[in-house]
Amino acid sequence: MKQPQLGKKILELRLDKGLTQTELAEKCNISLRTIQRIESTEVTPRSYTLKLIFKVLDFDGFSSSIKSENSNNSRKNVVRTILLLLTTSIVSILIFKLVSNSNKQSTKEVTEIINNNQSNIKRWMNNKQVDSVLTIYNDNACILNSVCGKIQIRQMMNDIVNNDYELIEYRSISINVSDTIAVEKYKNTYRYKGKVSNQIGITEWHFKNGKWLITNDFFRD
């Protein structure tokens, strides 16, 4: 309870008790001027003084005021907690979106990475560095849906390079990117057992552990 309601309440309680301002002051052991200023709403008494006055007037308003204040503080604390949680959640969502967007690569960036990978594959195949080629493949990658896993792919590539395989030209026709998947269409020219052939194919790339890796490769002469 605050002024002016407090002063009016003390005046009302004093009159109900049939006490004068002087008598109330004496019972509370405070000055008459203090009682006059409180009832005229000039000042707000300290908690200790207010407790004495209410005790003499047989009114538990002091404890009620404390409970009310505590209740208000409790509600304020709940509101603050809710606002803090909401703010934290919003900030977390914004940070997540910013990080997600920063991790996404543009089509141009992915195209450059894939072209660089294919350039390395051409060099490695022509130098019979099969294990280096396999670093660009997913562990469960498949070629023509029949040769799957790095063990089988290694055997196939070793058979090819041991029969005078040479990748003469590799040309990427198009690369379509959707989040963590890219589909590449390509043409190449190669020599195998002394014969030169042309080939067209589709390679499916997946972004995994920070790298673009081949997951599927389909081709035909």
Image (cartoon, rainbow, N blue to C red):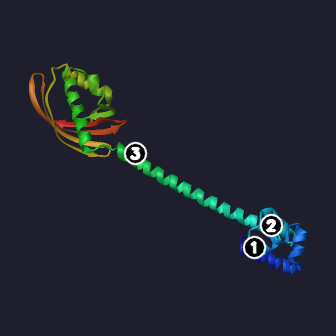
Among the 4 quarters of the image, the one containing residue 34: bottom right
| C-alpha gap between disc 1 and disc 3 | 56 Å
Please state if 122 lies on the left or on the right of 196 as rendered.
Answer: right
Task: Residue 77: give x, y in percent of width and height.
Answer: 63, 58
Type of amino acid at the residue the image marks with label 2: Leu
User: Could you say whether the residue bearing mark 2 is in a helix, strand or loop?
Assistant: helix
Q: Element under label 3?
A: helix
> Could you tell me residue 24's position as x and y percent?
88, 73
Q: Which residue is mark 1?
A: 6
Q: Position of residue 48 (x, y in %)?
A: 81, 62
Is the C-beta separation of discs 1 and 3 under 8 Å?
no
Most foreground residue, 30 or 112: 30
**Above or below, 210 relative to 17:** above
Q: CA distance from mark 3 to mark 2?
A: 58 Å
Residue beneath the point at 19% across and 27% down: 122
**Residue under pointer 3:** 99
Q: Amino acid at mark 3?
A: Val
Looking at the image, is mark 1 or mark 3 nearer the viewer?
1
Does residue 203 appear to the left or right of 41 in the view shown?
Answer: left
Q: What's the mark number on residue 169? A: none
Asked if the residues shown at circle 1 and circle 2 are in contact, with their CB atoms under 8 angstroms apart, the answer is yes
Q: Which residue is mark 2?
A: 50
